[in-house]
Amino acid sequence: MTPPETAPEGEPSPLLVERNGRVATLTLNRPHRRNAMSTALLGRLDHELRRLTDQGGEAPGALVLTGAGGTFSSGADTREPDWRDLSRRAVRRAHFRTVFATLHEAPFAVVAAVEGYALGGGLELALACDLVVAGEGALFGLPELGVGAVPGGGAVHSLVRRAGRGVAARMLLIPGERVRADELARLGAVERTVPDGGALAEAQALAASVAAGDPALLEAGVRLLRDSGHLDRTAALGVENGYWWQAASAANRDPSPPSGQP
């Protein structure tokens, strides 16, 4: 595994790692920049996600992603000195892609705890999670077109699928458009809202309840959730059947269903 880029000497780590029983928490830790994702932060996040995923029996049952200082993330750090350097942008882009791919393949549930802003890449990171818990006043948006970019981490696809084309169009095309967590909850893109300031505690409690389940069943469940949403019914039923047998085998259970059960 390639070591991540480190923060300059004397600066705090851009990512905090905590483990409490079966729940791990990763905290984006650049509050002075509203947790904008620098190359160093993305490298550290990439590294830690792959480390957690590769732990085998020591992997967590659930992971919480959050941000320090009352905000989730304002997206990519466009103030990095080499922001316009295409080769360095390619490095950041590679980290982004690996982070999203690792989240999709993680054998555990991932819960986003969102306060303040989740913009651009921050929104993409939140929507890459299996569950989103947000403070009622949290604001979500896609400002990429205004900074010379387009979303590249799946946010438009996720919004269209989870909340509808209308809200995706608003957030992508209308300059400065921000959507509150309570509206996204009504539309289905946020699973749970809480009073502002309570997202992390609620997300960790939710993660603990999820992580208490059978690991083999949880892995099959999250993979089924991630893999079947875009499929037609016939294909989705095929995916479900595959994960049903995988879970039954991994849990060392009798795969023959009781009479009258599917």
Image: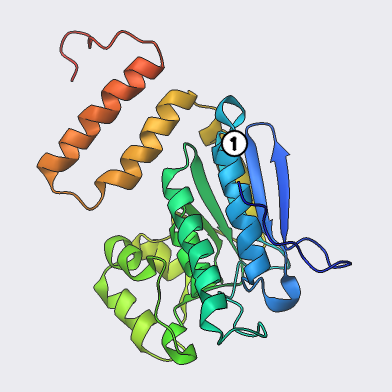
**Of 177 and 101, the residue lying toward us:** 101
Q: Is residue 190 left or right of residue 10?
A: left
Q: Residue at x 51, y 46 (%)?
A: 110
Looking at the rendered structure, the kind of residue marked 1 is Ala
Circle 1 Cα neighbour tier, 10 Å, few/some/many (<14 / 14–19 / ≥20):
many
Q: Quadrant of residue 242?
A: top left
* Residue found at the far right of this picture: 10
**Residue at (60%, 70%) from the top-left corner?**
73
Residue 236 versus residue 192 in the image, above or below: above
- In the rendered structure, the answer to whether residue 129 lies left or right of residue 201 reads left
> Can residue 81 be spotted in the picture?
yes
Q: Quadrant of the image for the C terminus?
A: top left
| Residue 136: percent from left, percent from top | 54, 66
Q: Write down the residue under mark 1.
A: 208
**Which residue is rendered at x = 47% and y = 53% of the image?**
129
Question: Left or right: where does residue 182 sit relative to residue 230?
Answer: right
Looking at this view, is 35 or 89 the one in front?
89
Res 199 visible: no
Q: Residue 113: name its quadrant.
A: bottom right
Asked which quadrant contains residue 117, the reply is bottom right
Residue 80: % across, % down: 66, 82
Farthest residue, direction left: 234
Callout 1: helix, strand or loop? helix
Which residue occupies the foreground of this view, 189 or 33? 33
User: As drawn, is 230 to the left or to the right of 38?
Assistant: left
Position of residue 172 measured from the top left corner of the image (x, y, whole percent): 36, 82
Badge count: 1
